[in-house]
Amino acid sequence: MKLDLISTSEAARYMGVKGEPDDAVAELLDKAEKLVREKLSPNYVCRETSVELTEDGVKLGCMDKLLVGKSLRKHLEGCDRAILLAATLSADADKLIRQAAVENMAFSLAVDCICSAAVEQVCDKAEEEIFADRQNLYRTWRFSPGYGDLPIDIQGDILNALNAQRRIGLTVTESCLLVPTKSVTAIIGISSNPISKGEKGCAVCSRRDSCIYSKNNLKNCCH
C-alpha cells in the first residue's frame, strides 16, 4: 500500500498544537511528511468472523477467548459478523523516528506525529479496500483494544487470529504494546441491516483521563 498526502494538520494536533502551527512547526511537518511517504510501505491484514453476543461479552468465531465487557458488546449490537483488522507502518517507521532524533529532537517529534496520522490513513484505506466488495453491508466504526472496558491485553489474541506476525511482522510485548509501534488493531462490526454506530471518541475511551488530547480539549483521537 502506498501512502497519499498525510494530513499535517492532524499531525500538528498530535503534537499538541492548537490552531494553525507556526512557520517553524509547519516546515518540520512538511519535511517529515515527505520523508514518511518516501520511505514507508504500510501493510494490513484482515479476517471476517462470526459474532455471538453473550451476557458477559462477545465471542468471535476466530478466537477462543471471550471478549469481556459491555462496551464492545454494545458496539456490535445488531451485527452477526465482524472484521478483525491489523495495520502497520512497518518497523521502518520506528527506525525513521530514531534516526530523526539524532538530527533534531523536534524533527523526531514531527516524524512521530506524521506517522501517527499516517497509520490512521492506512486504516481508512484498508476499510475502503475491505468493503469495496461488501457494498451492501452496514458497518460500525473501528473499535480497538483499550476503548471503553475492552481490555488492552487482547492484542495478542487478535494478532494470533490474524497470523499477523508472519503476514505483516506485527507482534505484541508483555505489556501489550504493539511492535512496530505505529500499528493499530481493531474490530469492525458488519450487518445486512442498518445498525447504530453508537458513541465514538473520548466518551468511550478508557484512557481519556490521562490522554493529552482530552486534557487539552482537542479533537477526539479515536478512529
Image (spheres, grey):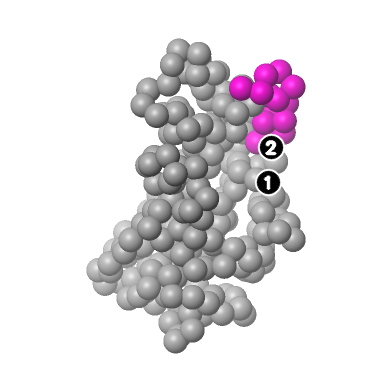
Q: Residue at x 66, y 65 (%)?
A: 156
Q: Are marks 1 and 2 in contact (CB under 8 Å)?
A: yes
Up-down relation of residue 117 to residue 29 (above or below): below
Seen as rendered, the residue at the extreme bottom is: 55
Q: Residues within 10 Å of mark 1 (few under 14, many from 20)?
A: some
The span picked out in magenta is: 93-106
Quick one: SS at disc 2? Answer: helix
Q: What residue sits right under mark 1 in the picture?
A: 180
Percent coordinates x, y for residue 111 in the rendering: 59, 28
Q: Residue at x 54, y 18 (%)?
A: 28
Q: What residue sits right under mark 2 in the picture?
A: 94
**What is the spatial separation of the Cα atoms under label 1 and label 2, in whole angstroms?**
7 Å
Label 1 vs 2, first from the N-terminus: 2
The main secondary structure of the magenta stretch is helix
Q: Is residue 150 magenta?
A: no
Q: Could you tell me the amino acid type at mark 1?
A: Pro
| Residue 195 falls left or right of residue 28 | left
Percent coordinates x, y for residue 212 in the rendering: 49, 42
| Residue 185 falls left or right of residue 204 | right
